[in-house]
Image: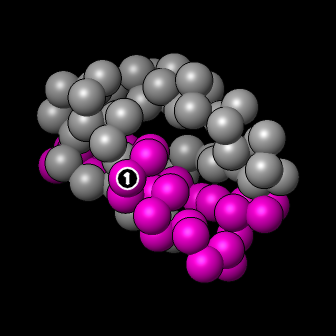
Amino acid sequence: MKEQVQAVLEQVRPFLQRDGGDVQLVDVDAEGVVKVKLVGACHGCPGATMTLKNGIERVLKEKVPGIKEVRSV
């Protein structure tokens, strides 16, 4: 599952990098919780939670079966 998540993050990454940010995969646990680290302009951005939930989490849930939640660490 971790490889699938990484592949999807590679698809999302250009959109984040366009605004000076990025995302790093930290872990995927057995319960389907993905832990990521937002870096660059995304770290501390007021819209980071929206990006995380409405962007990254939505796409991961659509493309990787078993993903329940994405958390920023």
Q: Which of 15 and 61 is in front in this view?
A: 15
Residue 13 occupies which quadrant of the picture? top right
Q: Is residue 68 above or below residue 51?
A: above
Measuring 30% from the left and 23% from the top, which residue is drawn there?
Answer: 63
Tell me the magenta residue range.
28-56
**Residue 46 seen from this side:** yes
Measuring 18% from the left and 26% from the top, which residue is drawn there?
Answer: 65
Measuring 45% from the left and 64% from the top, which residue is drawn there?
Answer: 50
In this image, 56 relative to 11: left or right?
Answer: left
- Give, as a three-letter code, the residue at label 1: Asn
Q: Nearer the viewer, residue 49 or 6?
A: 49
Measuring 55% from the left and 45% from the top, which residue is drawn there?
Answer: 25
**Residue 34 seen from this side:** no
In this image, 46 relative to 17: left or right?
Answer: left
Q: Is residue 14 above or below residue 48?
A: above
Q: Nearer the viewer, residue 28 or 55?
A: 55
Q: What residue did someone put label 1 on?
A: 54
Quick one: quadrant of the N terminus?
top left
Magenta segment includes 48:
yes
Q: Which of 15 and 4 is in front in this view?
A: 15
Magenta segment includes 53:
yes
In this image, 21 relative to 45: left or right?
Answer: right
